[in-house]
Amino acid sequence: MEILKVQNLSKVYGQGEGQVKALRQVSFSMEKGEFAAVVGESGSGKSTLLNLVGGLDLPTQGKVFLDGMDLFALNEKERTVFRRRNIGFIFQAFHLIEELDVEQNITFPLLLDHQKPDSQRLEELLGLLGLKERRKHLPSQLSGGQQQRVAIGRALMMQPMLILADEPTGNLDSKSSRDVMELLLQAAKRYQQTILMITHNNNLAADADRVLRVSDGELKDMGGKAHEKLS
């Protein structure tokens, strides 16, 4: 089942001699439960791609469909609501609310949308994330790896159609990075969660179902789970 479809996506910044073509005619699609990693050098267009797929920025040209919905056919207010309900974000900086404990941070997006959290799903996620004993801890009482697990739980709690992860292991040591990657792989398998992740770590990217390489704003599908394809 196709969840994400990107068609001829382009983004140009500036005009004249100062014009920068951040993305050039990018097209790809993702199936439900698929985990794809986006790799490429700094400035290649990876973050621009993620921002456009998430509806955080507007393209110069092209379309993004999420479960058949044309993201840019919506007005700004409609797109904001659609994004909040259907797209989960995980960032390199954890963006947790310091005054809220683990449980409250995980359920915050639901409360923001005036929805009652599913207590059974919360318990399941706390177990999956290894945070049951930390449920009442504040972010300042957690390690970096634990804070990123909370951020993953927050993204999963809404049961979004798509999770966008922007360098989710960038601030973590190698063991915590591996743990976070394992959690994302489990989420894709256990919940049929579709995940698009930017990473500079080729070893982590090689565990994804597919690797998409962005270079000078152009995207190439490298296929799946083959370390040599990243070399």
Image (cartoon, helix red, strand yellow):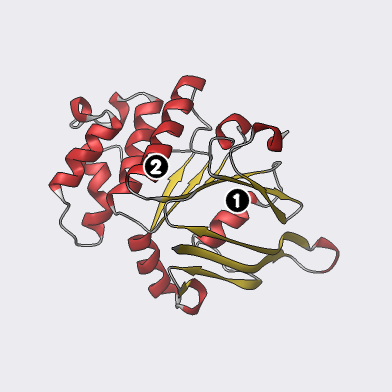
Name the residue carrying label 1: 47
Q: Amino acid at mark 2?
A: His
Task: Give how far across and how far down residue 54 sits, in percent.
Answer: 49, 60
User: Which one is earlier in the sequence, the residue at label 1 or at label 2?
Assistant: 1
Query: Relative to 201, does residue 83 appear above or below in the rendering?
Result: below
Q: Amino acid at mark 1?
A: Ser
Neighbours of disc 1 within 10 Å: few (<14), some (14-19), many (20+): some
Is 177 on the left or on the right of 133, as rendered? right
Name the residue carrying label 2: 95
> Is residue 101 in sight in this rendering?
no
Q: Residue at x 42, y 70 (%)?
A: 79
Quarter holding the C terminus?
top right
Q: Residue at x 35, y 48 (%)?
A: 155
Q: Between 172 and 137, which is closer to the camera in this rendering?
A: 172
Residue 223 disc label: none
Q: Between 158 and 138, which is closer to the camera in this rendering?
A: 158
Q: How many marks?
A: 2
Task: Give how far across and how far down residue 101 sits, in percent.
Answer: 22, 36
Q: Residue at x 33, y 43 (%)?
A: 190
Task: Give how far across and how far down residue 179 sits, in percent.
Answer: 42, 27
- Labels 1 & 2 near each other (Cβ < 8 A): no
Q: Choose top left, top right, bottom left or bottom right for residue 39.
A: top right
Is 230 on the left or on the right of 201, as rendered? right
Looking at the rendered structure, the secondary structure element under dot 1 is helix
Q: Which mark's residue is nearer the viewer, 1 or 2?
A: 1
Is 10 on the left or on the right of 68, as rendered? right
